[in-house]
């Protein structure tokens, strides 16, 4: 079995992420959003796949992230696009939380999307 080895770059403190509101960070010239999902932190592409609105300006209700521009919604658990839209899932990045510090793989590593 192939073992994945990453370098990690610290991007935020967990306490910087407000529940129910995405936090935008710029990593390697890439816009990324961090979300609290239960006890976990998820990292997704920060620009909407429709017309590139900044998803950090969107809102979260129940289990969906709503784009601020045209209100497309994405499941916060896996980034898949919700009903009424046929957009690609949000690109999801490897993220690690250790001692309250959120780190992303360097270079950015995509889990899915
Ligand atoms: S830019 Fe996000 S739905 Fe249009």
Image: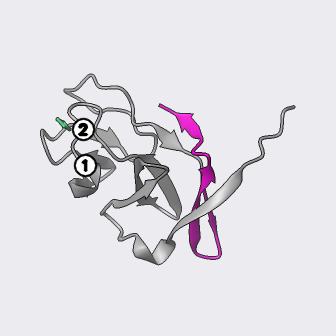
Span highlighted in magenta in the image: 95-113
Could you give the CA–CA distance between mark 1 and mark 2, rounded to whole angstroms? Answer: 6 Å
Label 2 lies in ligand 1 vicinity (Cβ under 8 Å) = yes
Q: Residue at x 43, y 48 (%)?
A: 29
64 on left or right of 98: left
Q: Position of residue 111 (x, y in %)?
A: 57, 37
Q: Which residue is mark 2?
A: 52
Would residue 100 be counted in the magenta stretch? yes
Task: Single out the residue that lies furthest toward the right.
Answer: 1
Q: Position of residue 43 (x, y in %)?
A: 47, 51
Residue 50 higher or lower than 21, as above or below: above
Q: Residue at x 29, y 25 (%)?
A: 87
Check disc 2 and report its element: helix, strand or loop: loop
Q: Residue at x 23, y 30 (%)?
A: 50
Q: Which residue is mark 1?
A: 54
Would residue 111 be counted in the magenta stretch? yes
Decide: few, some or many residues near mark 1? Use Cα within 10 Å; few <14, some 14-19, many ≥20: some
Check disc 1 and report its element: helix, strand or loop: loop
40 on left or right of 71: right
Task: Single out the residue that lies furthest toward the front.
Answer: 29
The main secondary structure of the magenta stretch is strand
């Amino acid at each position: 079995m192939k073992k994945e080895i990453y370098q990690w770059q610290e991007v935020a403190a967990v306490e910087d992420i407000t529940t129910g509101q995405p936090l935008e960070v710029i990593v390697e010239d890439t816009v990324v959003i961090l979300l609290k999902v239960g006890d976990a932190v998820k990292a997704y592409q920060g620009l909407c796949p429709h017309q590139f609105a900044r998803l950090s300006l969107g809102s979260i209700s129940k289990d969906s992230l709503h784009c601020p521009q045209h209100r497309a919604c994405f499941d916060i658990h896996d980034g898949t696009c919700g009903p009424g839209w046929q957009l690609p899932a949000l690109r999801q990045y490897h993220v690690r939380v250790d001692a309250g510090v959120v780190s992303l793989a360097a270079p950015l590593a995509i889990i899915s999307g």
